[in-house]
Amino acid sequence: MIITIICITILAYAIAGKDINKQLEKLKGVDWKAKSSDVFGKIGVYAKKAGRVATKPLLQLYYVLTMGETTTLEKALIVGAILYTVMPFSLIPFKAHRILGLLDEGLAVLYVVKKVQSKITPEINAKVDETLNAWFGTEETAQTTEPAE
C-alpha cells in the first residue's frame, strides 16, 4: 500500500510540476515485477465494470510497465495512474461531482499515456488487443452479435 501511495503522490506532483526526487528515492529496490502482477489483477476487475474502451489505455500502460527499458519514474507514473483509476475511492468522487469525478482519473491516464507514448509499440497494442479479446471476445464478435431478446 505504501508503494501505491508513493506512486500516486509522484503522479500528482508530476502533473502539478513539483519536485518528485524525494519520492522517487523511496522507490529504490521496489520489486516492479510483483507490483505489475498486482496491477494486472486490478485491471481485470476494473475491466468488468468499465468495458473494453476504458480498459484499453490501462492495458497499454500495463504492458509499458512490464518492459525492461521503462524508467523508475515512468513505472511510478504508470502504477499511480492505473491504481488511481481502478481504486474505489477518488479525490473527486463521482457520486458527488458526476463528470468531474470521471475526469480526474481520465486526465491522470491521459497524462501518463502522453509521457510514455513512444513506448506504446505495435507489439504492445497487439498484446492489448489479445488481452481485450480474451476478456471481452473479439471485436468482430462483439459487433456482429445481436442482443438476446
Image: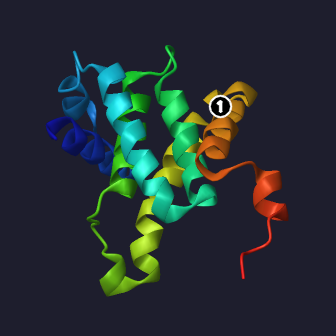
Give the residue at x 56% y 35%. 116
Residue 14 visible to the viewer: no
Give the residue at x 36% y 84%. 97
Q: How many marks?
A: 1
Q: Nearer the viewer, residue 79 or 107?
A: 79
Q: Nearer the viewer, residue 12 or 66?
A: 66
Q: Position of residue 1 (x, y in %)?
A: 16, 41
Quarter that holds the C terminus: bottom right
Q: Position of residue 76 (x, y in %)?
A: 35, 34
Quadrant in which residue 85 is drawn = bottom left
Helix, strand or loop status at disc 1: helix
Residue 20 visible to the viewer: yes
Give the residue at x 43% y 55%. 46
Image check: 109 left or right of 124? Answer: left
Question: How dense is the environment of label 1, judged by Cα within 10 Å: few (below 14), some, or many (20 and up)?
Answer: some
Residue designated by label 1: 127
Give the residue at x 69% y 50%. 137
Q: Position of residue 102 (x, y in %)?
A: 45, 71
Q: Nearer the viewer, residue 50 or 67?
A: 50
Q: Position of residue 79 (x, y in %)?
A: 37, 39
Inspect the image, locate mark 1, and give the three-letter code of the amino acid beneath it: Lys
In this view, the residue farthest toward the left is 2
Image check: 12 left or right of 61? Answer: left
Quadrant in which residue 145 is drawn = bottom right
In this view, the residue farthest toward the front is 149
Q: Nearer the viewer, residue 129 or 26?
A: 129
